[in-house]
Image (tube, coloured by chain):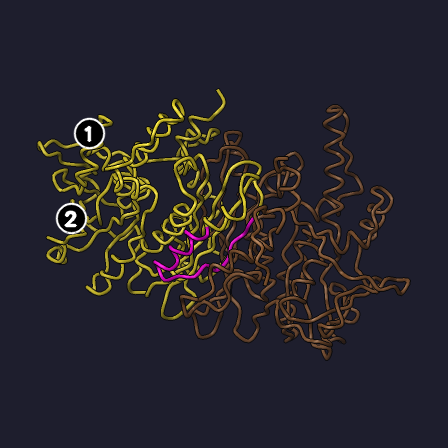
Chain colours: A yellow, B brown
Amino acid sequence: MSKKEYINIEEIGEFGLIEEIKKLFPDKKRQETVVGIGDDAAVLNMNDQFLTLLSTDNLNEEVHFDLFYTPLKHLGFKSVSVSASDICAMNGEPIGVTVGIALDSRFTVPMVKEFYEGVRIACNKYGIDLIGGDTTGSYKGLFINTSIIGKVEKDRVTYRSGAGPGDLICVTGDLGGAYVGLLIMQREKEVHMEAPQATIKLEGYEYLIERLLKPEARLDVVRMLRELDVVPSAMIDISDGLASDLLHICAASNVGCVIYEEKFPIDPIVYRTALLEFNLNPTTVFLSGGEDYELLFTIPERYGDLFENHPDITIIGKILPKEEGTYMISKSGNKYELTAQGWDAFRKYLRENSNP
Amino acid sequence: MSKKEYINIEEIGEFGLIEEIKKLFPDKKRQETVVGIGDDAAVLNMNDQFLTLLSTDNLNEEVHFDLFYTPLKHLGFKSVSVSASDICAMNGEPIGVTVGIALDSRFTVPMVKEFYEGVRIACNKYGIDLIGGDTTGSYKGLFINTSIIGKVEKDRVTYRSGAGPGDLICVTGDLGGAYVGLLIMQREKEVHMEAPQATIKLEGYEYLIERLLKPEARLDVVRMLRELDVVPSAMIDISDGLASDLLHICAASNVGCVIYEEKFPIDPIVYRTALLEFNLNPTTVFLSGGEDYELLFTIPERYGDLFENHPDITIIGKILPKEEGTYMISKSGNKYELTAQGWDAFRKYLRENSNP
């Protein structure tokens, strides 16, 4: 145990800070509390049949989104999706969401209604209710907080901690699109700042921009898993980046892993744009992009056939005993250790904005 | 129905804005949803025995608190109290709370730990767990969001809407202290700004400052009501000010009311400080002060004897048929209509900070 006293938040990062906070709360006070801090959502036992799930998320202007290229309706949709994704990551069904906003004086009633129109579209999509919120002033900036309640059958709840050696590592959809979409938007913003008359060119990038601005929680996958009668051994939603989130599963499950570069589901437009326009290795984008809100889960090997040629799920690797480490095998057969260079918006932001 | 399209948020205020948002969500999507927006907490039916309660609150720097005179530990405590108070207002028992913070670069690890130490003390006090949160960066300022989950027996849930003519209007504790505490702190801040060497004088004001900085949710009253086997007909916590919150009950219950100035529980130090140091009518402070987080509830007349000389509960008036209006009878016997000049932090803030 280190005795070091950390002072700078940047030094320990968001996850380190959460660990420090957790230490202050060693005991459970309520028998209902199954899991408090540390998974995608809190898990409460309030019922014989179901577990109750609760998760909360902040979306802050200039940290998580830029209103220059984020329409308010999309932002409302994304706020709900990000929260619903946390419930999906527990293999649960979302029920109701609260959406609180803190607004500065730029905002008007029509703007707020546009934001909540996006909230409404997302609620309809996931079949959930808006059940509350708080509307307050802010000194500067738009701050959004969502809290979502959901439920999951006791024998279907899926934590980060259940992966065992031999389990297959699966990912839904494709990854990296949201990050490349962000790069596109940042590039166009810079062009606009230098030449406000210039036309913003987004043709051909629609998929990337939609991945950034309008991510969808994979409730469809949760429902499909139920229909297939498959319970993943571990699950997380990919918000920080595949490598970071897979390492979360490995740490919580006390296991290692291997993933294979040749299996990575990367959309051709993501691949091409990353490589040709931003000179980025598509594999790096896949591993560290983040914000795609796809699901990463592990399943016992016997279910492998179900997903072998699935259009929407890709098996990218395998869980190993802990002592074998956590690594990727590249297309050329080399072995690389996985590192969590995720989209740690928090750390990055503090670094860029801390006083010298 | 007015066809007017509102543009300025200031013009319609927080409550008007919430009404506009509610219009976008006319239907319930989930059978679990009993009450969505519009009471102190959302009410969900996820269980045969209990109803599940969920409430969310924002506390924003420079709008809801000033770090000049708010110790972080007190702020952590208050964040949880404000949330727990919403569950109490539904006659429920809190179970777990999530506390999310957005921090700018002023904050250090010890500061965050001090804040969560206050969260811990409050969790211990109410016997609840910290079950989650989100730790993010902010461009400028400290933003706190709390979401709390609780439960209440189906035959004990108390809405704002159940008050009927003849019911007695009860208030817990005493009111106005938090507001006068705020005035004291603002005065001392001004003194400090003008003369940083001057000593800040807080002796004799301890009660007022504690009311401002360390309000407690009245879970003790909720538990006492259970022991007495009394279910209030309507309840709300007093965050905006007694007049504003009583008018919320009257509107939701479709009734009128009369309250008697001579009954108002005002602590002598609140009375004296308001009148002598700030030249404020103590009755105005009582009616409009806000932020005391006491409970306001109505009970059928037959329970009146239980609270007639109660040390902690005061009967201040009576519910009337709607057509008789909502008013106060002054000590001199005059009749004054009640108006909601509550502590609408939001509106006030926007007014003071909107662009000309």
Marking on residue A217: none
The answer to which image quadrant residue A219 occupies is: bottom left
Q: Position of residue B297 (x, y in %)?
A: 68, 67
Q: Are the numbered discs 1 and 2 placed on the same chain, yes or no? A: yes
**Left or right of A106 on screen, residue A186:** left
**The magenta stretch spans residue A186:** no
Q: CA distance from mark 1 to mark 2?
A: 24 Å
Residue drawn at (72%, 67%), measured in percent from left and top?
Answer: B170
Q: Which residues are magenta?
A: A116-135
Instruction: Pick the residue in front: B336 or A265.
Output: B336
- Above or below, A98 against B277 in this view is below
Please, which residue is most extreme toward the top here? A356
On screen, A10 above or below A26?
above
Residue A124 among those drawn in magenta:
yes
In the rendered structure, find residue A275 and report the number of the disc placed on it.
1
Q: Secondary structure at mark 2?
A: strand
Which residue is identified by label 2? Answer: A315
Q: Report the chain holding disc 2.
A: A
